[in-house]
Image (cartoon, rainbow, N blue to C red):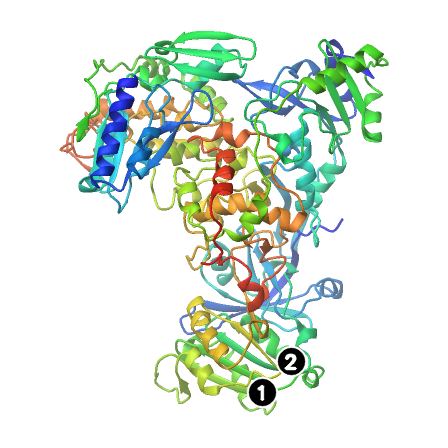
Amino acid sequence: MSGIENAVQDAAKKLLAENKVDVVIGFAQGSQPLRSTPAFIRKPEEAEKLTWNCTCENNLANYLRKKEQKIGVVVKGCDSRSILALMKENQINRDNLYIIGVPCSGMIDRKQVADLCEGKEIIAAECTDDALVLKGHDFEKTVNIVDVLHRSCAACTHKNPVIYDEMVAEAVTEQKEDFADIEAFEAKSTAERRAYLSQELSKCIRCYACRNACPMCYCEQCFVDCSTPEWVGKSASDIQDNMLFQAVRVFHGAGRCTDCGACERACPMGIDLRILTRKLVKDAKELFDAEAGVKMEDKPALSTFESDDPQPFLVKE
Amino acid sequence: MNNPYLPLPMKLVKNFTETEDKLIHTFTLEFQSEEDEKSFAYTPGQFAELCVFGKGEAPFGIASSPTEKGQLKFSVAKVGVVSTALHLMEEGATVGVRGPLGNSFPMEDLKGKNLVVIGGGFAFTTLRALSTYILHPDNRADFGDLTVIYGARNPGLLLYKEELAEWEGRSDINLVQTIDRPADGWDGRVGFIPAVVEEVAPSAENTVAIICGPPVMIKFTMPVLEKLGFKPEQTIMSLENRMKCGIGMCGRCNVGSQYVCKDGPVFTRSQLLELPNEY
Amino acid sequence: MIITKQDIPNFLDSLKNNYQVFAPVKQDNYTMFKAITSGSDAILDYSNSKIPPKGILFPQTEELFSYKVDKQGAHLEEKIDSEQKVIFGIRPCDAKSIALLDNVFNNDKYEDPYYLTRRENTVLVGIGCNQPQSTCFCTSVEGGPFDTTNLDLLLVDIGDKYVVEVLTDKGKKVLTSAACSDASEADKQAAAKTKESATVVSKVNLDGLKQKLDSNFYDEIWDSISEKCIGCAACTYSCPTCHCFDIVDEAKDCDGCRVRNWDSCMFPEFTIHGSGHNPRPSGKERFRNRVMHKFKYFIDVNNATACVGCGRCIQNCPVNLDIREVLADIQGSEARSVS
């Protein structure tokens, strides 16, 4: 891991020293155990602040839309897919972007780690290549990173960046797509699915962290904020409205969402948002053979029309 | 405990299309009882939240003067949910009014002073309230010379045309009307407000300027007033930040530590110079 | 006085006869304050709730009044909640935040009857913090793990029982339904020792911060300080002192009603004018306003810092934008007072 970290720092330092970019966006050590934080590095000598470990959870593509500056960015597989998807939507000018690709072995899920510690506060943590050493007031624990990977990382099919200017390490082995989780959910009755989603969305506080953490959520005015007309009620106490908010949001991401998990990680209330976003990822793949942010030449699923497109939503076939 | 969130139901007695582009209507509302009217004692410069039941509420400056008994007037541009609903309302309908809110023009301090009232476009509403109040026989002697400089993009966009015509004929007010560009049928003055203020050149001595209008008009009129000798404490403005509660609680209209709704909307320029430029 | 942990469920159940009782309960892997149906729902080993209990007095969504409009006019029915309430297990920082909110909802000109009625009818039973979290910095903002500001009772955890400090008559009255015994000298000593050993590790330096903020509105630091902020409301909605709200009309669970919802200064719509002009157009201005509001404007108006050091904004921020670091950065910056 420290090899990658050094390589990231070197790449950033070089870019800044040679004035190829104005800023490098990467990760720095966060203020709490198991946290890293997005960092904006503008001087070569600050490049040493950059870090790389299993807590670099944010999708940095979120900081790249409509920017005038020349930016260097440290990306994982998922970040790179979002960048590619945003390029297709004319949100990113590739000429102004230098992509430092990092093959990613997956980021941890802080929620799972907290569960393993039974809610006791972790006051220090150390990341090694494949394990976390956690320390609390009255405990010390070592957990394998693979056991606490965020679910989107555990299911990731593009660990290696799909687009980059330089890659700082050897590619890692990819795995096959597996939608078993979504298939299990689809197999449930409508009532069961509704009950589950209602329970999850009853926790929503409408802070919109999910939306704002998503690189693909960039509407100038989100439909939830619109007052003329008011498409959806503003109160968080209405589960139907919370459900409508998420439903429209995930539909809007159909064929654009890369299942990076940024929305779910951002949610302070721990709502299972991926059950919705990933269902749409599966649908886009199965119905339109569309996979977001993988190939530049693929047309966006919802912006193209073929006469033989499946229409199960519209017509009973 | 008095509930500041409850609106007073009032009857819409007149829904008048004020401008040629039909985007501004003036609403005349009637108090339902003497008690209601008593509970709504106001001063020029204050505002109120108008509510259309089922649509919501929005803040508007009170365009009538307290000397006009039994009713309130509001001139409203069609921009959002509430204002659009208001425009469509039929006479006789019930409208909710919450207020009066905010401070007001400092009427006591203005006594004995000459006044230069400068307004642009549809920001003339509370200036109408002020001018009407001063022109009332009970009050006129309390104030010195009254100069009103009022401009709009074209004649059709001037508010309160009948009253302007009446003021033209009076000797106790010096009314200067102007439009931005020449227009058919307009034989009055043509020119932007800052230039007209410079031409009229009111003396700053024992005078207070009260100015309301679009940001660009304010921006270019300020240097003119300064040149004429108006000090920041002699210049009064009214801010229009987005508001909701109107009572200094909901948090959105602050400029620095001042809430425009509760501590304003009327500020002297010297007060504003102390505040950040978030308006 | 002494109450054993074993007796707490019975105590809460008996309180339920006269009060609506709110207590910390488990939701997923975190804690929330909720109205409990049984005394045994309350959990006692928690750090602090995910969302502060301010929502009990100032709900995220609240109907202000309902109305009917017909030919005769409008008929309004105000919905003031005057039910007696107990918030059991509130932490001292959150209790202190309510003292700050009192300033907002009872300002120099207006009183908010919804908040103030609930406030008057609510008893605050605090539990001190034996083990403050690493994100807690209450002692830097005039609080402490056993601070009694605003509390009616303070419970000090000494193992299998609590030493109860009676702070007000309201608290005394609540305690009559508890199976209490007198605290022994040993209990009192244990409580004193507990208080002593609770340490708040995290510190924020507020010395001179206000003076700095008085003059640094146009400082370049605001450009970089908020750069990573994504503009969500995870911080404001989890903040015990944030009080911004919106008012809307709804017709869903009523013929017609006016409702207020929490709102956030981090959202662009919060300040946008009808004309489209926005006085706080980007994340920079909005973030600056949030910091200024807590550490300058609130002091200007109410002579108190609008932060109680609960650390929730630190824990809940999706990008780990840490207010302690923000304040330290401001402290380290050069002041610049011109635009």
Q: Which residue is mark 1?
A: B173
Q: Amino acid at mark 1?
A: Ile
Q: Quadrant of the N terminus of chain A?
A: top left
User: What is the chain letter for disc 2?
Assistant: B
Residue B215, position in %: x, y? 44, 66
Looking at the image, residue C192 sits to the left or right of residue A105; the answer is: right
Closest to the observer: A147 or A205? A147
Q: Which residue is mark 2?
A: B134
Badge 1 crowding class, 10 Å Cα cut-off, few under 14, some 14 to 19, many 20 or more, is: some
Residue shown at 33% from the left, 34% from the top: A46
Residue A43, position in %: x, y? 30, 38
User: For the residues marked 2 and 1, what is the alpha-carbon distance in whole angstroms?
Assistant: 10 Å
Judging from the image, what secondary structure is the residue with disc 2 in?
helix
Same chain assignment for discs 2 and 1 = yes
Q: Amino acid at mark 2?
A: Ile
- Which label number is shown at residue A35? none
Residue B115, position in %: x, y? 59, 81
Looking at the image, residue A195 sits to the left or right of residue B70; the answer is: left
Closest to the observer: B84 or A85? A85
Judging from the image, what secondary structure is the residue with disc 1 in?
loop
Image height check: is B228 above or below C278? below
